[in-house]
Every structure is written in C-alpha cells, then in structure tokens.
Image (cartoon, helix red, strand yellow):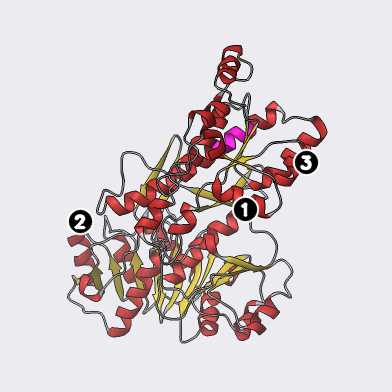
Amino acid sequence: FAKGLKGLGFEIISSGGTAKFLRKAGIKVTEVAKLTKYPPMLDGRVKTLHPIIYGAILADQNNPKHLKELKKYRIKPFQLVVCNLYPFEQVIGRSKFTHAEAIENIDIGGPCMVRAAAKNHQSVAVVVDPSDYPLILEELKTAGAISLSTREKLALKAFKHTRYYDTVILRYLAGCYEEGAEEFPKEKEVLLEKIQTLRYGENPHQKAAFYREVQIGGRKFGSQVANAKQLHGKELSYNNIVDMDAAWSLVNYFAEPTVGIIKHTNPCGVAKSDNVLAAYKKAFDCDPVSAFGGIVAANRRIDEEMVREMSKTFLEVVIAPSYTPKALETLKEKKNLRVMEMGEPAGKPFSGLDYKRVSGGLLAQEPDLAQLAVNEVRIVTEKQPTLAEMEDLFFAWGVAKYVKSNAIVIAKNGVAIGVGAGQMNRIEAAELAVRRSRTKVKGAVLASDAFFPFPDVVEFAAKEGITAIIQPGGSIKDQDSIIKANENKIAMLFTGRRHFTH
C-alpha cells in the first residue's frame, strides 16, 4: 500500500517502528520525530501526540483561517491517515499474558489520530482496515483523489473500529477490577461479529445473518454452536441454526451416550444407551414421522454404523463432537445434508448470558444450567420409586428442560416415548405426550417442567398406567395432587425447581 501511495507522489510520515519496517522494504519515509522535533519518549508511549501532527490532521482544508494557521506554524496538512492499532485483543486472547502486557498494548495515539481524521473526513481520509487499501489506490489512480462518499464510509468504519477497540478494553478491565461486580450493570454492551449472511430468516421474505458473541480476555463460555465447523452440505439456514442449538444443548445435558432428534426446536425423539447407534435407533422409534427432515445431535463421536442407520431417512443436519473417517465419507454422499462438528466432547454447556429480543429492548438472563442431584429431590408420596423409575424420572426431567412450555415428557427405559410441547395448559400437554407415544405408556414415568395447579394430570397419568411422576411442586394445591397420587399408588417427586422454556 505504501509503495502504491509513493508511486502516486505521496510523502509518507510514520512513527519509528513502522518507519523502520517501510525502510526495509525500500520505501522512503519521514519519521514523526523529524516534524515534531521531539523523539519518542516514555518507552514509546508518546510519539504522535503533538500539535504539528494533530494540526495536520484536524485542519479544515476549506477554511481560510485554518489554512492561514497551518502556514503560520509551517504545518503541511495530511490527506490520508492509515493506522493499525496496537493488538490489544490478540494479546489478551493468548493463553498466557501478563496484566502489564495488556496495559502496554492499550493504544493511545492510534485511536486519537483515527478519531481526529474521522471527525475531519471532509478533508482527510482515514483507513483502519487493510481490505480498503486496494479501493483507496484505485480511486487515487483513476480520479486523483478520494471521493467524499468514500471518505464518509471510511470515517464511519473508523468510529466503529475505535468503539469496538475501547469496548474490548473496557470488558477486560471490568473483569480485572470489578471482581464480583453485578452481572447486570446499568449499561451493557453485547459485542458481535458476523459469521455469515444467511439466505433468509425464519421465512423467505425475511433477511438474516448469523453473529458470534465476541469473548474477551480468553474467557471461555463453554460449548457453543456459533463455533461449530461445517464439514459438508449446503448453506445453513436460520432455522437450522436455531434447531442445532436446541439439539446440541439437549444432548449436552446427559453424561451417557445420548441422541436427540429435533423438529422446530422441540425434541421428537431422545434416548440414551450404551452407544450412539443404539441411542439413535431408540430415539428414531419415538416418532419416525416427525424425525423426517429433523436435526440429529449426538454427544459422542458418530461412527459408520450410526450413519448407515441415519441414511434410511431424510435429515437436514447432523451435529456431533466428531466423526470417524468412514462415517464422514458416507455422510458426504448425501449432497445437501449439513454435517456439523463441534470439535470437542459434550459436557461443557454454554455459560454465557441468554438474550431474548423484545420490541424496543433486550431481556438478559443467566443460562439454565441447573443439573438435578439426587439429594435435591423430595419424595412426597407413600409409594417410593424403584431404582429403575428413579433413573427414568431423572432422564425425563432432563429432556423436559429442553421442551417448550407447557412441557410433559413420558419416559421408559431411557427413552422419551412421548413428548407434549408448547401447550396452553398442562393437561393437554399430558394428553399430547400420550397420543404421540408409539408404545403403551403403562409402567412409564412422567416429568412436568412446572408444578400442577390441579390434580388432573395425576389423575390422567393414573388412567394411562404411569407409575411415577417428577415435578417441581410449589402449587397451593400440591396436596390435592399428592392425595391423588397416593390413591393410585403413584410415586411422586418434587424437585423444588422448574424449567420453563419459552
């Protein structure tokens, strides 16, 4: 870029390090110190902070008074300011760095010059992105000057750049100096970088893009779909990404080999087993009709045997920690199937804040990472659950956590045999869960994501042969449900915690 500018007759002024670099490339350059008559001082902290430099940047070159002052102080105005800021973000992103290193990499002169040039874009062009170098050279070659419209766009980009740079510094220092500070401050920035522009949003008439939340200072939020690597298949859609996140979060909850099949963010099949092949078969059998066009997630490496089984139906996306070479080769035979690799084992759930957009605002909450422990549950009925029922109750509870409210999950032998999702009342969710079951629910267990306001679900479960129930408890009519469970010899557990998902 410097060679191109030199070839167009520009004089190049630079601070020491850059000047040395350019000279090595055979480019004639004048050091800042020659203009200011001051050498770099304070270990290089002060180089460009001088009226001669800022006068040359900030002078309105259409203002006769400004031009007169420049002449008085023998200042030549700049036409172009090119600046790459100190690599603060790269430094704090390293696995090892000291706080002193971070502080020394907070650029002062660079952002000052960038903001000054951006403010004065009527007279000066500012470049902070190397991808703009060819555009600048082309305009200078063809038109002899950088157009006002280009200078305006460059100024906007420059202010965005310094805003981002300062926000990264703020987030880092807040983490250092505000230990234990409130998680929801009066003002909050959410830093996002675009991963890709999507073909469309939820529907073809909606434009959309996919963004990743920027993580500051090497902090890791856990396993996240935004970092998934696409190994094969056509471009991801908006709905694919939403469903992928739901599927990965679901299987990530369980320690045993687990497979989930998601349709429209709800699980239509979930099962755990000794291996993912067995788990997939059981999950698929939950609801083969809904599984068509679904998203399959596994919390273990997928092998060729599971791939052969999956190939029997049409799927949109497969997501897993990894794949065997043969499995990946076979998956790639399906031209449009999107194959996503998380690149790490499951078990590290995403721990960043959960955001939800509403008109005119943004809701923020801690993610629901609660895992249910045995010592947290309370058996409230005369009948005690068996060990097998306890295992199924905990499994059903985990699945219900990822089903849209109102949610009822019926499980048996580590398989979610019936799922009732997103209903306006809980009894209809229970009826739907039974209706969607392809097997008899007699001897199965039932999980509810929230308490029972009436004993109707318990009564219905008893008629269907459900033997155990897990629910949060906390209703003023809990005793009615307990009485109904005792009458029908159903074991019931209270968790003291609900899992609404909206």
Give the image location of residue 148, x and y in percent. 69, 26
- Secondary structure mostly seen in magenta is helix
Label placed on residue 477: 2
Residue 500 in view: no
The residue that label 1 is drawn on is 21
Left or right of 465 on screen, residue 301: right
Amino acid carrying label 1: it is: Phe
Local crowd at mark 2 within 10 Å, few (<14), some, or many (≥20)?
some
Q: Nearer the viewer, residue 134 or 397?
A: 134
The one nearer the camera, 182 or 421, is 182
Which mark, residue 7? 3
Relative to the observer, which residue lies in front, 372 or 456? Answer: 372
**Residue at x 55%, y 83% (from the top left corner):** 277
Q: Which amino acid lies under the numbered mark 2 shown in the image of this protein?
A: Lys
Q: Do tag 3 and tag 2 residues touch (Cβ < 8 Å)?
A: no
Residue 333 position (above or below residue 433): below
Tell me where residue 165 appears, x and y as whole percent.
47, 45
Q: Is residue 155 left or right of residue 406?
A: right
Task: Give the x, y percent position of residue 276.
Answer: 52, 82
Q: Is residue 345 above or below residue 89?
A: below
Which one is closest to the eye, mark 3 or mark 2? 3
- Residue 147: percent from the left, percent from the top? 72, 28
